[in-house]
Image: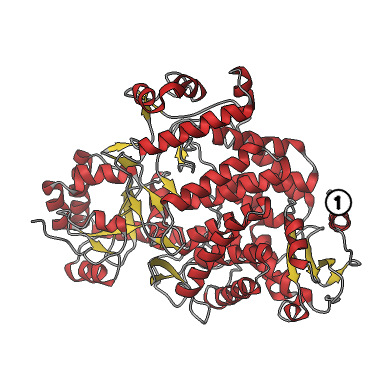
Amino acid sequence: MKKPNALLGQNSPYLKQHLYNPVEWYPWGEDALKKARSEDKPLLVSVGYSACHWCHVMERESFEDAEVARLMNAHFVCVKVDREERPDVDHLYMNAVQMLTGRGGWPLNCFALPDGRPFWGGTYFPKDQWKSILSRIAELYEKQRQDIEEQAGKITGGIAESGFIEIDDGRPAFGMDDVRTMYTNLMEYMDNKEGGLRGAPKFPLPNNQEFLLHYHQKTGDKKALDQVVLTLKNMAMGGIYDQAGGGFARYTVDDRWKIPHFEKMLYDNGQLVSLYALAYKLVKEPLFKEVVYETVAFAERELCSPDGVFYSALDADSEGEEGRFYVWKERELDAVLGEDAPLIKQYYHIGGKAFWEKGYNILLRDQDDRVFAGRSGLSLPSWQSVLSRAKQKLMEARSRRVRPGLDDKVLVSWNALMIKGLADAFSAFGDEALLSKACRAADFLLQHAMKENGALFRSLQRTQASIPGFLEDYAFFSHALIRLYEVSSEEKYLAAALKLARYVMEHFSVADTHMFAFSPLDGEQLAAPHFELYDNVMPSSNSVMARVLFYLANYYENPDFGRRSSLMLNDLRSRLNKYSSSFSNWGILLMHHLRDFYTVAVTGPQAVDTARRLSEHYLPDVLLATASSEAATKSIDVLHGRYSGVKTQIHVCSMGYCKLPVEGIEEALAQMSSKA
């Protein structure tokens, strides 16, 4: 019987995968650091996540190999880290590896001094190369210790310096020229044929698309909207989207959205539900609505816990093969689909564009359903009936396959992205079931992940919370709660967001910068502090927190929150137009800070219904506040004194100044409409 290592008792599915490796893994923590200090051994910090294909490959090749394990155990204290549980640790060592090599990824393998300061690292290494590296690092540590100490000092200092944004003493002043420059820069990198950014691999990057949607609304520039529609259509028809079961893979390895890296992550799908729902408001594209509902159905079917919150991810691999759960051989489709097979194979380009490798096909399409139906001599309803029947057969057949592994961590920040996605979907489609799902998940997190004083935990296993929350958790959850308040009119969500923001202001603020630290100042401090600034596959926690403060400043007419948001944005202003893709969420905040941002107070007996009809419109520079009784105006400043008691009125306000109240939605929209 295999003997477990020191990962015994850990909740992370990724750590559990390594529990019986011959490598003497430790979880990140004082036990590992103490052992490294007492034995004067370097740390070998290996970071990954459960759905990572190349993490599995390196485990099979090296970490399960007795000879490799002997080398690792003899010369190093080996630490396994789930990057999703401990993004702070991941940030530290990823920054070090990127500084050393110019690239990063997972698995991440970094060598550090016993005090945690990194001195060398890389990503995936084949077994023989890994053995050579282990021997060489051990020799250097013994014979050239001073050089390693100096290297560690330089790297740690460089990490600390690169992430620290000093205060800009200039007075915040933003103009439309700043936004246009960001837009022009972003469009230079866009793929005008396939959508998204040019080149491969191809990631969805929802923030870029949301920035373009917002820019279109602000300026009327049709090219911005066309780019979003192109991207969303091609993604929805490509292999990155699960054509049979809904939901998106993390990215594609090619430049045509065809060949996915098959893991499915909650954070991608939550953001993409938001994006497709928001885009639907503008273009009313049926495909976008279909994607939203299928993706929500996927999340509920395969990622939803009995408590209504969402698990983290599905693995890329099953049966030892990447993507095996999702791909099809032509003969399999013939057997499963019967008489529908010829038409369905034509629709999904089986044997043609869909062909991948080893006889397998990745389902994809390139035609609108209406167009395909017409070319096939069918009415649209008839074709949709055939397609629906085929998808059901495909899902039934797929259910008999070996399923990909499930990472059943419940992460607060990732759940927040899905909660916001569901709220945005409800605002677009008015489906109460979507709102119910969002509220159920939010209520569970408020009860089990948040303390009375506003402190958050990061991770949950059922009702057991663990790991103090990071800025990402506070920022994403408070943003989701604000959005949920807008669409539900439940004041408790806005009150919770306010409590979270106050906690962040107190516990994450650092001297000499307006940015917030990623880790709370009263929590564990790593070898170098981290300030998350760059928007990537998820928006940066500082950009989201700056947006949250801006929204709360408008709801509660709080100048301190508004000032902090402005100062954060101002300190980054010189960077925004250099590579706009990395600052697109900051760009959304920049557009908020220009003229024509409104908080709309809807009061009166029909306030909730009126607010919901208003939210059906795409209004990125509008916050909604609702009071259907006079009592509901007491706790939110923008509602004070604006309840008439008889009529339902719409007050279009901007930081304390309101236009004359109106009763009709069209009148309110007219008060808000203007182009920069």
**Residue 132 screen position, x and y as percent:** 19, 43
* Left or right: 138 as drawn, with respect to 440: left
Classify mark 1: helix, strand or loop.
loop
At horizontal 53% and vertical 61% (from top left) the residue drawn is 416
At horizontal 53% and vertical 78% (from top left) the residue drawn is 454
Q: Which residue is mark 1?
A: 674
Most extreme residue toward the right is 660
Asked if residue 62 can be seen in this view, the reply is yes
**Residue 190 screen position, x and y as percent:** 62, 35
* Left or right: 44 as drawn, with respect to 507: left
Instruction: Identify the image quadrant of residue 225.
Output: top right
Quarter occupied by the N terminus: bottom left
At horizontal 24% and vertical 67% (from top left) the residue drawn is 9
At horizontal 43% and vertical 44% (from top left) the residue drawn is 102
**Residue 81 screen position, x and y as percent:** 32, 59
Q: Nearer the viewer, residue 76 or 176?
A: 176
Q: Nearer the viewer, residue 471 or 260?
A: 260
Tell me the kind of residue under disc 1.
Ser
State how the image is colored: secondary structure
Asked if residue 193 can be seen in this view, the reply is no
Vertical comparison of 174 with 565: above or below = above
